[in-house]
Image: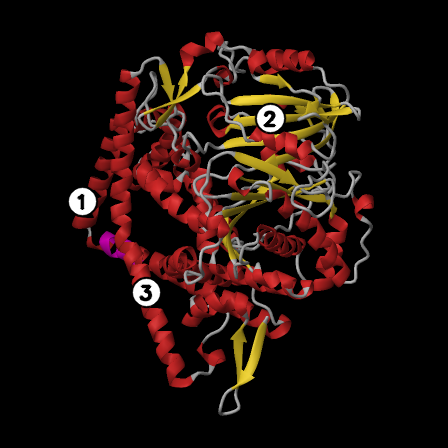
Amino acid sequence: MRATRRDSRGRRLSLPLSGETDDFKGGAALGLGSGGMADEGLGLQGWCRWLLSAAVTALAFGTALMLLPTLLLMYSVVSRVRAAWLGVLERRYPQLEFVRNTTVRTAVDTIRNQGVIALLLTVQGACEPRLVMDSLQRDILDRRHPDGSGRLRFPHLRTPLTQRWGRYAWKRDDAVHFQLDKQVIPCSATFRGRLVTDNIIQEVVSDLVSKYLAPELPPWQIALIPMPSADRYFVLIRMHHLLLSEDGLKLTDLLQLTRTHLQPDYSAVTDVTPVSHLLDGMVERPAAIPALYERVGESVANHWNELVAVYDPLENPKVLTSPSLFGLCVAVLISLVSAVPEVVSGRGGGGGRPAGSRSVREQLAVQLARRGVTAAAWRSAFAGALWRLLTLAVSPPTLALAAGLACYRMWRSAGSMALRVVLIVALEAALLAKYRARSPYLRLWWHSLQEAQRLAKLVFLAPRLLVEDLLLSHRHQPPHHFQTVSLCGRKVVAWSDPFPQDLIRQVAQATGASASEVCLSALCGALREYFRSHGLAVPETVLTTARYCLLEELVGGPAQSSTGGLACLALPVADAGKDPVQLVQEVRARMRAVRRRQGALWVLSSWQLERGLLTRLLPQLLVRLHLNFLSRRYAVALTEVASPRPDHPAGKLWGQPLQSLMYWRPPQANVSLSLTLLTVDSMVSLGVMSDAQLSPQQGVIARAWTQHLRDLARAAGVAVPSPRALSPSPAPSFSSSTPVGVPEDQDDDL
């Protein structure tokens, strides 16, 4: 959305709203964004600003190019130093199994602030700890590796975790002392003299989550919380993140969670629809370039097959009847192309060379021998070529005839190519004259050029926009409570009542925003309510990192594609006291600016999440310093979790029906608040995990989020049922000390 005014000459000027201000000052000021010099109409002053902005952008891009060799050298040095240091530690502590991979979580892990995942499930039925332990022992702890080696599938579930000289390591010798009854904790049906009910379950869970895991035990724990007043119980799982990254452990593996929607082949699912999420459209995926690549590949493959059919001795044995130097050279090329895949497959794609594998030279010799390209064939070809040269030299008529044939072939090739170009141009002209459209092939080339230009623009603007968005945006705003609170490392949790997704979609349709933007605007109001309940000054904006995850990736099912990286959001918390519909429009405008500016950040962060880009380039100490600085600035983390399926049956846990589940992404480094938007079974819930220094007001965020959604729906003219009709749990009061009831339909995140 843009406002307009007129200058002294009466010309209309387009001005950005508050959510688009940074974009106007950044990439759009180059004339490469949505605006441009023609739209600004600012005369000489505008040209001067445009030239200055272009110079700064070019300087940032040139600086990034000059830093690339340094980063490559640093990667080489860091990888070798890490390997050497790991070898020293392994020789010094042979009884330990050191963790070889360095991730963002391991870089910022401390003893007081570890990345421990928390998952809460509501199970219908009677709580029987012995059956749970028997199932874990039989199906998880004693499970063997499917390769037939007899190794345990998840050996680290039995071993404690320790640190030596900044590196995580597993205590393999302590596996013999493993006791399952110390990992599965049956809890009492009372908490501080009160029976466990929906009204106090959040206090019970927060009390369990706030306790550190025992360092002498394996870093996971399952707490069984019975509820005498209802035929259900709660299961709280706490697990160190290394168990998921090192062993490839999935939550469904540990819990034996069976969900009927998890199918081995996603192509068999017919009702899967694309999910419109908060970070949808961050980068427009190229479509014409892959299509053009596929088409060119098909053309090259067709020409290669024709070449093989004519010159490959295995396909055409007549090549060796009277061999020529050109034919033998082509046969060598075919043999080399056939040898390379054999070498790669023999090494299994790794860097080592197993016994029995051949080098490229050895495999090439084998392929040449198969085709009969021997020394005798080369001698015959050389003799034939020498004889033809002598014949041409002693016979001028023959030489003239050969030259004429060569000229004729060249003329025929040039004429054929010219005729083909003329036909293509004539066909294109006919299509333009009759159908007003270009041919599909030329249209594909044109779209590929446009996509290449868009990608080049993204790369060129990336260095400057990264610095502006990560370091310079909102730098004059005074720090707020989330950024200045002294963290203790212990965690507390809260969660909201589920809100119907259909109502959110109706609000989104009425306001012209997306469902995720509606939830985000309600979150702005919830954060504002937190500051007010604390008696603190409400900040103008709260800087947040946002990420989207597929539900299938979190619970162990097959995922359709990569979910991408992170984006930096500036939530307009101070504007949350205004009209709710105007707040949605403000959030929508800011999200449009984020999608325009942060495509490079989204791509780079996705590379880090998938391949460990940052942790491979920089030493662990520098990674920790950078992340501690950025997490102090972006002290709130937001994760949106959804599924491509419209319906999500809950499934069963240890043979008992599963009613709901809730996941909390643990905040680390200087992140004090982690928020999770969960969508499952057409219900949306908000999960809150914060540092214990924010307790007990962290529950205000969850309760206020639901209340702001109701206020927004009423302001948009959408009928909202009563709170009791939306959730089976009793509606809590709006005080900061009263816990909220357990949601019925929630899911997990990673």
The N terminus - image quarter: bottom right
Mark 2 vs mark 3, foreground winner is 2
* Model colouring: secondary structure
Extent of the magenta region? 398-404
User: Label 1, on which residue?
Assistant: 390
Q: Tell which of 275 and 504 is nearer to you.
A: 504
Q: Secondary structure at mark 2?
A: strand
Q: Is 63 on the left-hand or right-hand side of 350?
A: left
Magenta stretch, main secondary structure, is: helix
Task: Tell which circle, 2 or 1, labels the residue nearer the N-terminal end.
Answer: 2
Question: In terms of image quadrants, where is residue 65?
Answer: bottom left
Q: Tell which of 198 and 292 is nearer to you.
A: 198
In three-dimensional space, the C-alpha distance between marks 2 and 3, rounded to whole angstroms, equals: 51 Å
User: Label 3, on which residue?
Assistant: 58
Q: Position of residue 218 (x, y in %)?
A: 49, 18
* 222 versus 686 height, above or below: above
Which residue is at 48% across, 33% downward?
A: 115
* 227 versus 279 height, above or below: above
* C-beta proximity under 8 Å, tags 2 and 1: no
Residue type highlighted by circle 2: Ile
Categorize mark 2 by other alpha carbons within 10 Å: few (<14), some (14-19), many (20+).
many
* 638 versus 415 height, above or below: above
In three-dimensional space, the C-alpha distance between marks 1 and 3, rounded to whole angstroms, equals: 62 Å
The C terminus - image quarter: top right
Question: In terms of image quadrants, where is residue 142?
Answer: top right
Q: Tell which of 400 and 180 is nearer to you.
A: 180
User: Label 2, on which residue?
Assistant: 237
Residue type highlighted by circle 3: Ala
Q: Secondary structure at mark 3?
A: helix
